[in-house]
């Protein structure tokens, strides 16, 4: 399966997901009940998924041995549409050349990025007096930003004997650092005021051609994609009266 087909399938799957969840919005919102937590503040996130590289050794996802990806981070919701996030991901990338190059590459990458997140739908549902108390079950989003990668690649003959430590020479000193631009999107599913789950697809464009310890084409930088599922946790405000004021609700006062 080439890279274009891979991403078309992902896009088709996300489209179906958006359509089916949109049909279930009203019923799910009613089952979830009313929220008294403002759509603003800190969110802690952690996730896991799979990663694949696009480089001189492997130009499509068909020659990838899909690697693992793990990440942690924090997100600050500024309003129902805009958020900013800081994320750290650890990835293992592996690919095998399908031609006569006889190269297998493995790379360990730490990605540190800051991103701007935009919700394609208002996080709140309803209208008029009920708008601030009802939240959507599913909200699609896009995100993008930049940062740096700290990477350590190694390459070796694909046909080397088992338990052999034969490797190709390093083309530069590792570990090394390079810039990265990240773009992508996903869907956030809200299950309670504290817990949400967000599958997402991200593409990372680096400024280095050495992510695979190979620089046969200096004009083509190495990139990689990540498909992951993230768990989002929103800490509960300690002051319930303060929370009510944020929502525009008058707190109950006892009569003297």
Image (spheres, rainbow, N blue to C red):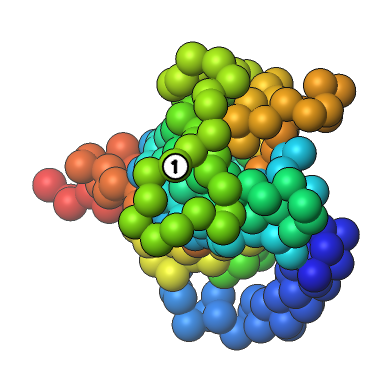
Q: Is residue 39 visible?
A: no
Pick whichever, 54 or 138, lies toward us.
54
Which corner quadrant holds the N terminus? bottom right
Compared with 217, 55 (above or below) is below
Q: Residue at x 64, y 55 (%)?
A: 96
In the displayed structure image, the side of residue 174 where residue 97 appears, left or right: right
Question: Could you say where residue 125 lies in the image, as x and y percent from the top left?
Answer: 64, 62
Pick whichever, 163 or 90, lies toward us.
163
- The number of discs equals 1
> Residue 163's image quarter?
bottom left
Residue under numbered circle 1: 166
Question: Could you say where residue 78 lies in the image, as x and y percent from the top left?
Answer: 55, 32
Q: Residue at x 75, y 58 (%)?
A: 98
Compared with 124, 20 (above or below) is below
Compared with 246, 216 (above or below) is above
Q: Is residue 93 visible?
A: yes
Question: Could you say where residue 25 lies in the image, as x and y percent from the top left?
Answer: 65, 76
In the displayed structure image, the side of residue 239 where residue 85 appears, left or right: right
Q: Residue at x 61, y 36 (%)?
A: 212
């Amino acid at each position: 399966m080439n890279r274009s087909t891979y991403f078309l399938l992902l896009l088709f799957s996300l489209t179906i997901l958006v359509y089916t969840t949109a049909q279930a919005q009203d019923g799910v919102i009613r089952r979830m009940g009313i929220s008294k937590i403002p759509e603003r503040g800190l969110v802690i996130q952690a996730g896991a998924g799979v990663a694949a590289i696009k480089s001189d050794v492997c130009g499509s996802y068909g020659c990838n041995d899909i690697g693992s990806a793990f990440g942690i981070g924090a997100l600050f919701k500024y309003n129902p549409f805009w958020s900013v996030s800081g994320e750290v991901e650890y990835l293992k990338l592996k690919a095998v050349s399908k031609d006569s190059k006889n190269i297998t590459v493995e790379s360990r990458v730490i990605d540190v990025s800051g991103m701007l997140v935009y919700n394609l739908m208002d996080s709140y549902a309803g209208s008029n007096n009920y708008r601030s108390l009802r939240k959507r079950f599913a909200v699609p989003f896009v995100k993008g930003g930049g940062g740096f990668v700290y990477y350590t690649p190694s390459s070796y003959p694909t046909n080397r004997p088992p338990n052999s430590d034969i490797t190709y020479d390093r083309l530069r000193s590792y570990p090394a650092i390079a810039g990265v631009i990240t773009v992508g999107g996903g869907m956030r599913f809200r299950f309670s005021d504290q817990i949400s789950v967000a599958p997402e697809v991200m593409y990372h464009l680096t400024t280095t051609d050495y992510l695979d310890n190979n620089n046969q084409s200096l004009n083509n930088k190495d990139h990689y994609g990540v498909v992951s599922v993230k768990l989002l946790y929103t800490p509960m405000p300690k002051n319930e009266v303060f929370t009510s004021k944020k929502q525009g609700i008058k707190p109950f006062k006892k009569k003297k």
